[in-house]
Amino acid sequence: MMEYSNQIIEGLFQKYKPMFGEDYDRYRNHVYRVFLNCQLMDSDENNIDKYAIASVFHDIGIWTDNTIDYLDPSMEEAKIYLIESEKQDWIEEITMMIYWHHKMSEYRGKHSKTIEFFRKADWIDVSLGLVTFGYDSQKIKQFRKKIPNLGFHIFLINKIFKRFLKHPQNPLPMFTK
């Protein structure tokens, strides 16, 4: 049975709460939907904590570095956390989950199972459940209903638009790295 609360996610959100400000609930809900999508695809309980950590950190650079070019700062924050948590052996896998989460093409290589599930989980949520990769669309709808969007996509569109005004040649750096 999937839970809608996770100790790692909750602990990290308490740590970063002041930084998120008014975006706290909208990002937290996105994180939980991605996390639950991962669990929908991967029944291996050994990966739950990895998905929780990757879910929290995958976009966190938006707030830690105040940028839409957030992949590198997000991976760095995850790395710091993993070192502090004595989970150095997860650094490569989780930073790769973050790095690949916007890619359109399938990842093939070391840790491909978790990286691919995470990539798909984020795409499912970013697409508002329109893209399901063949996974249970009713479950995905349930997640979206229980854990509402709260304007997360509008928030992203606003950030991207501001980036476009300053960098029209590269408005989506998170997709081009």
Image (cartoon, rainbow, N blue to C red):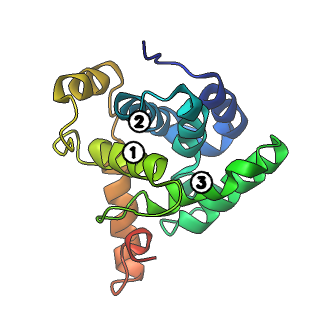
Is any part of residue 6 visible from this angle?
Answer: yes
> To which residue does mark 1 refer?
117
150 up-or-down from 164: above or below: above
Badge 2 amino acid: Cys
Distance of mark 3 from mark 2, alpha carbons? 15 Å
User: Residue visible at 72% across and 55% down?
Assistant: 79
Q: Which image quarter holds the N terminus?
A: top left
Which comes sooner in the sequence, label 3 or label 2?
A: 2
Q: Give whichever of 85, 156 is nearer the camera.
A: 85
Disc 1 on helix, strand or loop? helix
> To which residue does mark 3 refer?
93
Which comes sooner in the sequence, label 2 or label 1?
A: 2
Q: Label 3: how many residues lie within 10 Å, few (<14), some (14-19) or many (20+)?
A: some
Disc 2 on helix, strand or loop? helix
Badge 3 amino acid: Glu
Horizontal arrangement in the rendering, residue 78 relative to residue 86 (left or right): left
Horizontal arrangement in the rendering, residue 23 relative to residue 107 (left or right): right
User: Residue visible at 58% across and 48% down?
Assistant: 57
Distance of mark 3 from mark 1, alpha carbons? 12 Å
Badge 1 amino acid: Phe
Answer yes or no: do the residues labelled 3 and 1 have beta carbons within 8 Å?
Answer: no
Estimate the x, y position of residue 137 in percent, counting from the top left. 18, 30
Residue 141: quarter of image: top left
Estimate the x, y position of residue 140 in percent, counting from the top left. 25, 29
Answer yes or no: do the residues labelled 2 and 1 have beta carbons within 8 Å?
Answer: yes
Estimate the x, y position of residue 59 in percent, counting from the top left. 51, 53
> To which residue does mark 2 refer?
38
Which comes sooner in the sequence, label 3 or label 1?
A: 3
Mark drawn on residue 144: none
Estimate the x, y position of residue 126 in percent, counting from the top left. 30, 48
